[in-house]
């Protein structure tokens, strides 16, 4: 009898915890589109293989890459390090460390490396390795999760602030904070533009559900961006009759879209970091239950699944290529840097940088 009472008390405590314990997320109801899965344009395949690997020492998370006018490639790593490989080289060498978490990378016309650092904001790294903060606020609101970027021919920098609520630095890193923002679905993301002439940062769009990859269109008349929490790629018009309007490029993707980059052979490369979570989709219109999920121990919550998947899209959003590795040997693929000889595949968590030969 005594044991029964103890068990009842324990169950009451557990129940009260799951129902009442305060958590940082305040989920909103929405209706996730039905996930068709890996069919049609996304039919299961192993076309991402074979991959070859480049050592990144004792670091991990080669999240993005950029190439300068001389053919030097730079990669951003979890420790804050930026490593570089000269044209024709076969090894990455240490360069500088932002002391934050560098994510998106692009070189400007002067070969300064522009960095979207999730902890620090928008940075510029000179050819000599000198680091300058360009922006950490947009119209009075702190940039708490600078994510990806692209640079126009006029020098303007378009970049995403993934979440103004779930700071990557204060919520246990980029992956943890992204999971909280996606679970809440509260529309905390922004698409921003930094003007190097005025040194001002303006907000082009707000209310986005985890604003992520950013790529200017090839004609510079629009900017494409990923809304990870909605499984879609969107377009914001910068010029023409549709200036200031948004439209969908592709939606209902089978995974969480991450980085987005222009392909040197036209079109765009998109990384899908992980397949969608059936649990999260099923509970999209049950915000209370999503809050309960956040109270569970971390090992019991939905997690990103190790799966390799990058796709190439046309200007109109048609799927040109879908390269997969269902084994997830190279996990949480974030995007692609294309050169004439290789695809360099980036990752949230891998301990090496992957390459795929094109010839």
Image: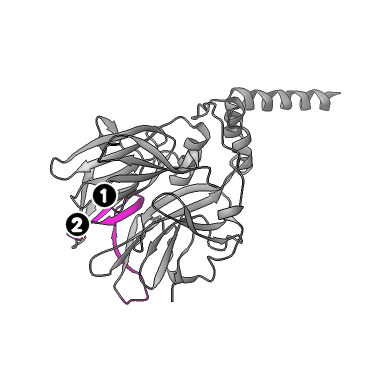
- Badge 2 is on which residue? 130
Q: Tell me: residue 314, above or below residue 183.
A: below
Q: Is any atom of residue 118 visible in this view?
A: no
Is residue 98 located in the magenta-colored stretch of the structure? yes
Q: Which residue is drawn at 34% across and 38% down?
A: 144
Please tell me which residue lies in front, 247 or 233.
247
Q: Where is residue 316 in the image (x, y as percent from the top left)?
A: 41, 49
Q: Position of residue 36 (x, y in %)?
A: 62, 45
Is residue 72 located in the magenta-colored stretch of the structure? no
Q: Which residue is drawn at 41% across and 65% down?
A: 344
Q: Is mark 1 on a helix, strand or loop?
A: loop
Mark 2 or mark 1: whose residue is earlier in sequence: 2
Which mark is on residue 197?
none
Cβ–Cβ below 8 Å for labels 2 and 1?
A: no
- Badge 1 is on which residue? 220
Q: Is any atom of residue 193 visible in this view?
A: yes
Please tell me which residue lies in front, 183 or 212.
212
Asked which quadrant contains residue 74, the reply is bottom left
Q: Distance between the residues labelled 2 and 1?
A: 29 Å
- Extent of the magenta region: 88-114
Q: Is mark 2 on a helix, strand or loop?
A: loop
Q: Residue at x 50, y 37 (%)?
A: 182
């Amino acid at each position: 009898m005594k044991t029964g009472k103890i068990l009842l008390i324990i169950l009451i405590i557990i129940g009260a915890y799951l129902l009442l314990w305060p958590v940082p997320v305040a989920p909103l109801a929405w209706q996730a589109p039905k996930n068709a899965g890996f069919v049609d344009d996304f039919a299961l395949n192993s076309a991402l293989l074979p991959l070859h690997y480049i050592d990144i020492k004792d670091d991990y998370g080669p999240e993005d890459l950029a190439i300068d006018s001389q053919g030097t490639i730079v990669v951003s790593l979890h420790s804050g390090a930026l490593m570089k490989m000269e044209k024709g080289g076969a090894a990455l060498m240490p360069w500088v460390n932002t002391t934050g978490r560098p994510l998106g990378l692009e070189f400007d016309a002067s070969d300064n490396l522009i960095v979207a650092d999730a902890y620090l904001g928008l940075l510029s790294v000179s050819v000599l390795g000198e680091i300058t903060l360009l922006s950490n606020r947009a119209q009075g609101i702190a940039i708490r999760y600078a994510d990806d970027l692209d640079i126009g021919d006029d020098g303007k920098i378009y970049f995403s602030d993934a979440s103004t609520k779930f700071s990557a630095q204060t919520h246990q890193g980029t992956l943890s904070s992204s999971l909280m923002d996606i679970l809440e679905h509260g529309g905390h993301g922004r698409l921003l533009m930094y003007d190097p002439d005025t040194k001002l940062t303006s907000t082009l769009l707000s209310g986005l559900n985890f604003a992520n990859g950013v790529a200017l269109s090839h004609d510079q008349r629009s900017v494409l961006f990923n809304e990870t929490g909605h499984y879609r790629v969107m377009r914001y018009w910068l010029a023409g009759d549709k200036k200031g309007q948004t439209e969908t490029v592709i939606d209902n993707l089978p995974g969480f879209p991450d980085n987005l980059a222009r392909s040197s052979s036209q079109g765009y490369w998109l990384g899908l970091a992980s397949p969608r979570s059936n649990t999260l989709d099923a509970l999209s219109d049950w915000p209370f239950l999503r809050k309960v999920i956040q109270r569970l121990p971390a090992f019991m919550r939905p997690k990103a699944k190790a799966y390799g998947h990058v796709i190439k899209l046309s200007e109109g959003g048609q799927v040109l290529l879908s390269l997969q590795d269902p084994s997830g040997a190279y996990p949480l693929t974030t995007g692609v840097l294309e050169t004439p000889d290789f695809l360099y595949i980036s990752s949230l968590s891998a301990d090496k940088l992957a390459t795929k030969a094109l010839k």
